[in-house]
Image (cartoon, helix red, strand yellow):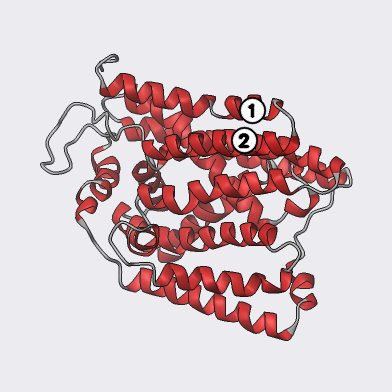
Amino acid sequence: MIILQTLGLILWLLIVPFCMGLLPLPLLGKKDRTPGVALIAGYILLFTLLELVGIPVVLLVVYNGFTAFKWWFTPVLLLCVALGVFFALKAKKSGQTWNFGGLSGWKAISLEEKLVFVLFLLLVGFQMYMAFTRASFDGDDAYYGVQAVVAQQIDTLYRINPYTGRSAPLDVRHALALFPIWEAFVGSMSNVHATIVSHSIVPLVLIPLTYILYYQIGKILLKKRKDLLPMFMVVIALWQMFGNISIYTTETFFLTRTWQGKSFAGNFIIPAVLWIFLNLFAGDDEQEKSTAQGGFWILLTCLNLAGGASSSLAILLSCLMTVGLAVLFAIRERKPGILIKACFSCVPGGLYVLLYLALTHGIIVL
């Protein structure tokens, strides 16, 4: 039983997002067709689909909402997995280069860099061990954790008051943020209790995922000093470990409330916006640059909706960052058309915000 549960968790938390992430990879530049980028892109697409499929179900289905959600969400995910594998194989046959050979890169670096990188891996391993064996609890667990459990056990979405267990009107303030519902989904498909998924399993995935994102950011920032990349990752890991200077820092959320949407917003969504724009800024070869930019604009559009799964505020922040960074990008490139692309990438997030305002201000009553 435990073996089947473990295999189920690996399937839904690693294999499915990775295969989904293969879908946009042919649209990116050669240097970005790596397993790490595939996993990052896969989670962006996963949470985009979570919002696209989940929001109508939450708003329109009163009873058996979680069952309806699974009936719609599961085939959509599997379809994206199949398309990702298909287009990746097609691109491979057409001669596109993929950077999936990590061992050769490891052999190319110096012994000192290898030792520093091993130190980084030990720090991450220590953080994952502590997150798994010393899971912390806070007041928000009484809401976010319980919403996942309610979805699993009572089969409703945001229509039970988690503090009393009684039926209640739709909680419109939180109903569009479906991060707990995703945890319930993973638990249900793997036959694991939602609380175990959120507190014990999700940190083991999101902590490495966040560091993979920071690694991609470091590759761009240190493009001319790649020998400093391992030390950059060590500094980031130490920063996360000793950033608990208050209960409000992203570092505190990262290691003590990893399973909550607010943590995902601060530690993945916002850095992902920076990562995408760093890639848009960084192209050297014009042909490679024009090829990759289309893929990154698509990812940015998805990200500006995917952030809503973690927090409604995350969408506002990502869209504001998109516009601000696009202004700098347009000035640098002297291309006003970049602002048009940025505005289009904010359309899904803007529609999300309008729906949120309509629900919370009584314009739409359910």
36 versus 120 height, above or below: above
Instruction: State the SS at label 2.
Output: helix
Q: Quadrant of residue 156?
A: top left
Left-right relation of 81 to 356: right
Residue 150 in the image: x percent, y percent? 24, 42
Question: In the rendered structure, are the residues bearing label 1 and label 2 in contact, judged by CB atoms less than 8 Å apart?
Answer: yes
Tag 1: Cα neighbours inside 10 Å, few (<14), some, or many (≥20)? Answer: many
Residue 233 in the image: x percent, y percent? 58, 70
Q: Which residue is mark 2?
A: 326
Query: Can residue 223 be seen at all in this image of the molecule?
Result: yes
Q: Quadrant of the C terminus?
A: top left
Q: Quadrant of residue 120?
A: bottom right
Residue 224 in the image: x percent, y percent? 76, 64
Q: Quadrant of the N terminus?
A: bottom left
Q: Report the amino acid beneath label 1.
A: Leu
Q: Which mark is residue 339?
A: 1
Q: Report the amino acid beneath label 2.
A: Ala
* Residue at 47% from the left image edge and 25% from the top image edge: 350
